[in-house]
Image: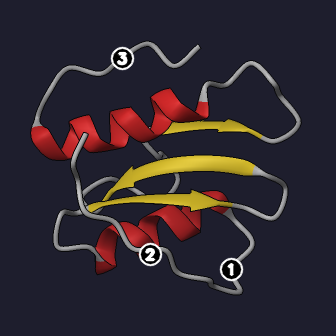
Amino acid sequence: EGIPFEIRIDPERSAARLALKAALASRLDVGIGIGTDRTVAVQHSKLDEETPLFTGGGDSADLDLTALGVNAARLVKGLPFKDIT
């Protein structure tokens, strides 16, 4: 999708909190967090920490991680989301 990104390591364990930290640190206001339990969250800086835009993963093989990343980029671009299931 052509959106710049940066990868950071953080001792936080929660995907939702990592995603919020990333969104708040990003000039694009969007962040993705991967928790120690392999849960993934996509967050916008203006959303509440407890309600990330997308969450999933963990031990579930049903989540399409590529679609989740594409949707994070689409959030930045203001485009409609793709189905992530």
Q: Label for residue 82?
A: 3
- The residue under label 3 is which amino acid type? Lys
State the image coordinates of residue 10 (x, y, percent, origin top left): 63, 85
Secondary structure of the residue carrying tag 1 is: loop
State the image coordinates of residue 19 (x, y, percent, origin top left): 49, 62
- Residue at horizontal 81 percent and vertical 42 percent from the top: 58
- Residue at horizontal 61 percent and vertical 25 percent from the top: 64
Tell me if 83 is positioned left or right of 44 in this view.
right
Q: Label for residue 57?
A: none
Q: Label for residue 21?
A: 2
Report the residue marked by disc 1: 12
Q: Is residue 52 above or below residue 66?
A: below
State the image coordinates of residue 16 (x, y, percent, origin top left): 57, 58
- The residue under label 1 is which amino acid type? Glu
Sequence order check: which comes first, mark 2 or mark 3? 2
Sequence order check: which comes first, mark 1 or mark 2? 1
Q: Is residue 56 above or below residue 46?
A: above
Residues marked 1 and 2 touching at CB (< 8 Å): yes
The quarter holding residue 65 reads top right
Secondary structure of the residue carrying tag 3 is: loop
Secondary structure of the residue carrying tag 2 is: helix
Within-10-Å neighbours for mark 2: few <14, some 14–19, many 20+: many
Q: Quadrant of the N terminus?
A: top left
The quarter holding residue 62 reads top right
- Residue at horizontal 81 percent and vertical 64 percent from the top: 36
Q: Is residue 52 above or below residue 65?
A: below
How far, Cα to Cα, is label 3 from label 1?
A: 28 Å
Within-10-Å neighbours for mark 3: few <14, some 14–19, many 20+: few
- The residue under label 2 is which amino acid type? Lys
State the image coordinates of residue 46 (x, y, percent, origin top left): 24, 58
